[in-house]
Image (spheres, grey):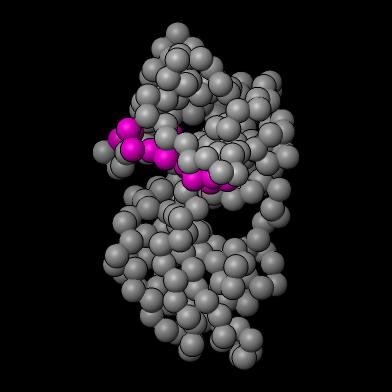
Amino acid sequence: MASNCFSQDIVINELMAKNTTYAQDEAGQFDDYIELRNNSSTNYQNLKDWHLTDTLGIPDKWNFPDSTTIAPHGYLVLWADEDGGQGDLHTNFKLDGDGEELYLINPDGEIVDQIIFENQVDDMSLSRIPNGTGDFVVKEGTIGFNNENTSSVDSPFAEAYRIYPNPSSDILYIDYEDNLALRNGVLEIFDLKGNRVFSQDIDAKNTGYNLTKLNPGMYIIAINGNFIDRLVRL
């Protein structure tokens, strides 16, 4: 595997080319994904006229939607599934788990980031360590989060909560251990760009939280600022 490390703001930060059980898209499918990271702490980055390609001879193979923006220190997840009918952030090419090339092209036609990889392991990612700047290493996925995080869903805090159903179409329920500290919490849901799209106090077990205002897609669930799980809104 070869990789180049660049100092510009937008980088390929993580990818998974054999996603069999790890992360579902808004259609509930385990498609391969590509995660971009905005390393800037202050600048929003619009990706109008940027491109992704797995074929160096076709630099504009997939065009980012004009409105695509990544917040400072934010992430953008793209599904590499050749199925643009499922959403604007689905590319017109797939990743080859047996070996592939991926190039990020800016509006001037310059390659600003790239990765060339060999045969991949099921449900393991290639992720930059340190996050956003380092070389690619094989590790557990951290889609939409800092690559240096451990698998937060295995933490004692996360295990104290049961959030269901997931995937969910309308109502999300939370159950938790008989602990007063767990009852006094705040449920937050973030999209994969890091925007908070839902916030509500947790005040009782089995309370239903209405998700009908959320668009279909993948989200991040946090309670009291702690990552709990990924949520698929159908």
Q: Residue at x 42, y 25 (%)?
A: 50
Observer-nearest of 134 and 218:
134
- Residue 21 screen position, x and y as percent: 52, 50
Observer-nearest of 141 and 121:
141
Furthest-front residue in this view: 42
Q: Which residues are magenta?
A: 65-84
- Relative to 119, is 202 above or below? below
Q: Is residue 117 magenta?
A: no
Residue 14, quarter of the rendered image? top right
Residue 117 seen? no
- Residue 206 screen position, x and y as percent: 45, 84
> Where the N terminus falls, by quadrant?
top right
> Where the C terminus falls, by quadrant?
bottom left
- Relative to 56, is 179 above or below? below
- Residue 23 screen position, x and y as percent: 50, 50
Left or right for 92, reference 145: left
Residue 53, quarter of the rendered image? top left
Furthest-left residue in this view: 85
